[in-house]
Amino acid sequence: MAFTRAEAFAPASMGNVGIGFDILGLAFQEPGDIVEVELCDQPGAVMHSIEGDGGILPLDANKNTASVAANAYLRQIGAKQGVSIRLCKQLPLGSGMGSSAASAVAAVVATNALFGSPLSRQELLSACMEGEALVSGYHADNVAPCLLGGITLICGTEAAQIYQLPIPGNLHLALVTANVSVPTSQARAVLPTTIPLKAMVAQTAGVACLIDALYRGDVKQMAAAMELDGVVEPARTHLIPMLKEIRTAAKAAGALSVVISGAGPTLCAVCDDAEVAKEVAQVMELVYKQAQLACVARCTQVDREGAQVLSLHE
Ligand code: HSE
């Protein structure tokens, strides 16, 4: 069947999941980006319009993660026709919530639906990563959970090197995003290029503890392990407004731990109860408000499905 228009949603995500720098990712149920693609006779992908980005993102098809990813997909399937993309940004830019990945994934998932879904989810990974690489580097800790859902272990850039991890049932997350932009490239530039063996051992132990906790559905140990990062977080603390104050206030309100979401500035508090997560979100928001810092606070859970096709028209 030939389709003319398709629309897809791709969720926000958290790279690293605390201690798992570049190797763990987690999809949030909300918010997410929406992309609509329309079939065109000209080959390749073009950007028709973008809303919700405050005019910041480029309409140049070579510079937008959505069109770069859709173009990679079109090349992959050898499409003779192309797509025109309408991007509805609902994720804040440079926020550590996988904004660029969500646009790339939504574009590829919508385009795949438009062409009758010739490729599986796993086969869409490389095209999505080409889009993400444009702004964030060639790593899959946002793209993989965004595309596939859940909590993912990323051992390489091939789909076969990505593993779904168990999701504890009572995992509730409170997020707060201060109104400052932290580009991933800047947050990566401050990282050490080598670390002492002792630090490597501690990081490895922390990641192992986290994986063990997930397999046992133990949110308390999961939360504690996420916070054990002694390498990346210390190097980035100065980029994240009031990390220490937010952590203290969130824990006093019942959060089990607080970590930087991806490269920041979003902070993610791990809770084991929905009501506690709501309270923690309010408390974190208050800390920023009292410091005259605009922010958005949210509660969410892990998204299990990944990006979704919202509509498909003949
Ligand atoms: N893992 C990345 C980083 C963030 O911490 O730099 C996700 O792109």
Image (cartoon, rainbow, N blue to C red):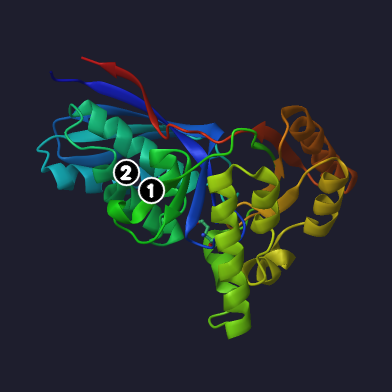
Q: Quadrant of residue 7?
A: top left
Q: Position of residue 241 (x, y in %)?
A: 76, 57
| Secondary structure of residue under mark 2 | helix
What label sits on residue 67 in the rendered view? 2
Q: Amino acid at mark 2?
A: Ser
- Residue 265's x, y, as percent? 66, 53
Q: For mark 1, does the 10 Å Cα neighbourhood hold few (<14), some (14 to 19), or many (20 or more) residues?
A: many
Q: Is residue 138 left or right of residue 243?
A: left
User: Is 186 in front, or is 30?
Assistant: 30
Say few, some or many: other residues with alpha carbon within 10 Å of mark 2 (under 14 / 14 to 19 / 20 or more): many
Q: Determine contact: label 1, label 2, CB under 8 Å.
A: yes
Q: Residue at x 72, y 65 (%)?
A: 237
- Quadrant placement of the N terminus: top left
In this rendering, does residue 68 appear at all?
Answer: yes
x and y, in percent, of residue 34 in the image: 44, 30
Q: Within the image, what quadrant is residue 9 found in?
A: top left
- Residue furthest to the top: 314
Residue that label 1 marks = 65
In the shown orientation, is residue 223 left or right of residue 246?
left
The reply, left or right, for residue 308 in relation to residue 231 is left
In this rendering, the answer to whether 183 lies above or below 216 is below
At x 50% / y 35%, what residue is drawn? Answer: 89
Nearer to us in this view, 112 or 305: 305
Locate the C terminus and report the quarter of the image it occupies. top left
Residue 90 visible in rendering: no
Find numbered disc 1 in the image and state the secondary structure of the residue it sits on: helix
Residue at image x 62%, y 78%?
199
The mark tally for this picture is 2
Distance Cα–Cα, label 1 vs label 2? 6 Å
Side of 313 relative to 217 (left or right): left
* Disc 1 residue type (three-letter): Thr
